[in-house]
Structure formats: C-alpha cells, structure tokens
Image (cartoon, rainbow, N blue to C red):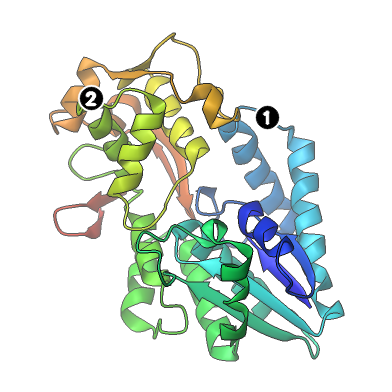
Amino acid sequence: MLHVHCGDCSADVQRQSDLPGDIIVWCDPVSAGPAPRGLSLEQWRELRAEYLVESTGHAMTREACIAWQARQDAALERLVDHEEVVFWFDGCMYDQTILIRHLDWLSRRERGVTTLSLIDIGEFPGKPDFVGLGELNAQELASLFPKRVPIDEECLSLGRDAWEAYGSPDPREIESLLASHDISPLPHLPDALWRHLQQFPALANGLNRLESEALQAIRDGHRRLREIFRYASQQEERPFFGDTTLWWTLHQLADCAIPLVSIDDGQPLPLWQPPAQTADRTVTLTETGVAVLEKQADFVVLNGIDRWIGGVHLRGQSIPWRFDNAHSRLEHL
C-alpha cells in the first residue's frame, strides 16, 4: 500500500500510527503561482521552479527545485507497484488544487490493477475549528483510514475537467465548471475554486483578498507579522495560506514602485526563515496603502502587475480580469 500526502505534517503523523504501507509527500503548492495547461513536463518544471525559487527568497536553486519536482513525480509514478494507493486531503485550497492535479494525472495513465482510494475531509469530530490533517494525532488520523472511498471514473473525470479549468487562460471556465458539473464527488472543491478566484485583483482597488486582509490587519493595529498572520487567518473560511505566502505577499506590497507598506528596517523579508525568527518584525501602511485600502486608488494602476493566477498571466497596468467582490463574480474588462 502507498499513502500520498501533500504535506510533511500529516505524513509525519501517519508515520507515528500503525497504518501499513509506504508514505510519500507531493507538495508543490500549485494553488500559488503559474499553473497553465498545455505545457510539456519540462516546461512545467521550469516555470514552477522559476516561481518557487523567487517566492522563497532563493532558498533553493533552480536546479535543486527541478530535481525535487522530479523526485516527487518519480515516487508517484511507482503507484503501479502497489495494490492500493490512498490519497489524503483536507478541504483547504492548497490541498484541493493538488488533488485535482493528481486526479488529472491519474486519468491519463495506465493504472493496472491498482486500487485508488481517497480521504477528503473538511471537518473532524470534536474539533470545531478544524484546520487540517496535520493537526490530528496518530490515532485520530488512523481513524479516517476505514472511511476512505474509491476513486472511480466519475471522480477522475471531474478532477481532469477541474484541472483543465484551473489551468485555462480564461478563468470563466472555473465558473462554468461549477455551474455545469456535478461536483458531489469532490465536495470541498467549489469553496476552494471560489477562493482561488478571489485572488484576482479586486474591481474596486486592485487588491486580491489576501492583500486586502493583510492591509486591513495593519490598519486595525496589528503591525507585527505574527499578528497580521493571526488576523488574516481568522478572516478565512478555511486555511488558505502559510507564513511564507503571507510574507511574500507583504514583500510584494513593499517592494514596488509606489509601496503600500513599509517593513520596519527597510530590508526584504527573509521568506524562508522559521516564523519564530521573523514574526516580530513590524509593518506599517504608507499613505498610498491607506488610499488603496479605502478604494481611493488602485494598486494595479499604480504599480502594474506581473503575476500568474492558475492559468492566467496578468501583466501591466490594464488587465482583462478583475474580481467583483460586491457581486462575487469575475469581470472581464
């Protein structure tokens, strides 16, 4: 048996349990950065490596990143050596985007007689503020194993269509998918995809949801990184980001032509250091940051943008896609 996790936390918990089988971790965070469809494997790894190296403050080299991706894929390729492969996921966007990536990948491969199973949970008894699989202890995590369900052709087809929509240069394909497909095989996917769409710059001021939450935290007096993280996390329906994602977001708001925030010593955030070493640094709003937050100015118009959101590459000061928060929908300009 092979168990596939998308994070070291849950994998480490399972290693402490008595569940049989081998364990691998596949954790490229495809919920962030470029994920366009239609690329060769080499093109995909090159593009992902470029993004990951930059967004982690060059904590690893491009060559090391590509080698890491290759090792993950090679471990997954060996699924046919096992009688059963169990995929472990929870309802957050990070997990759900990796899940549909795997389902698309599985749908295009010979799987022999290997049985595919899925654990996909959004809550856990006795944990009203359930965060994810990594917070469970070994006994709690093992209790989910008998509840695994088969990954059938319907589930594979939905995953393939969802991954195609996620990687499309036209994000309206995601809206169409949610409106036209039976999503019941993946019950947590709709919330994850809607949260993805909220990462498009807002129609009112050019901020995506996480940027807006971070600036609002600072305006409300939460200036330390640990406080900003806590405030922004509390605004999310499900866990959406980790410390590195938030640090990178704030870094981009500070390191632009007309900054929206100022970091205490004017130095770039050490994006890949442990949170304990960075959490007490402070961030303040600039006058421009206040104006953008109050919808008196537009971040994209002021600074331009060069950012991938799934399969969409936004560039320049006039972009074709915005998210209308007032009506919870994409706008094509």
Specify whether 167 is left or right of 6. Answer: left
Is residue 318 among the parts visible in the rendering? no
Q: CA distance from mark 1 to mark 2?
A: 31 Å
The image quadrant that residue 50 belongs to is top right
Q: CB under 8 Å between callouts 1 and 2?
A: no
* Residue 104 to residue 195: above or below: below
Badge 1 is on which residue? 59
* Residue at 42% in and 51% down: 240
* Residue 187 to residue 33: above or below: below
Which quarter of the image is occupied by the N terminus? bottom right
In the image shown, does 299 or 286 lie closer to the viewer?
286
Q: Inspect the image, locate mark 1, and give the three-letter code of the amino acid beneath it.
A: Ala
Q: Residues within 10 Å of mark 1 (few under 14, many from 20)?
A: some
* Residue at 73% in and 62% down: 15
Residue 19: which numbered mark, if any?
A: none
Could you tell me residue 108's position as x and y percent?
69, 78
Judged from the image, the secondary structure of the residue bearing numbered disc 1 is loop
Q: Inspect the image, locate mark 2, and give the three-letter code of the amino acid beneath it.
A: Gly
Is residue 228 among the parts visible in the rendering? yes
Could you tell me residue 299's position as x and y percent?
28, 30
Judged from the image, the secondary structure of the residue bearing numbered disc 2 is loop
Could you tell me residue 22's position as x and y percent?
80, 69
Specify whether 80 is left or right of 31. Answer: right
In the image shown, does 19 or 53 lie closer to the viewer?
19
Which of pointers 1 and 2 lies earlier in the amino acid sequence?
Answer: 1
Could you tell me residue 135's position as x and y percent?
52, 56
Badge 2 is on which residue? 221
Specify whether 325 is left or right of 117. Answer: left
* Residue at 72% in and 32% down: 60
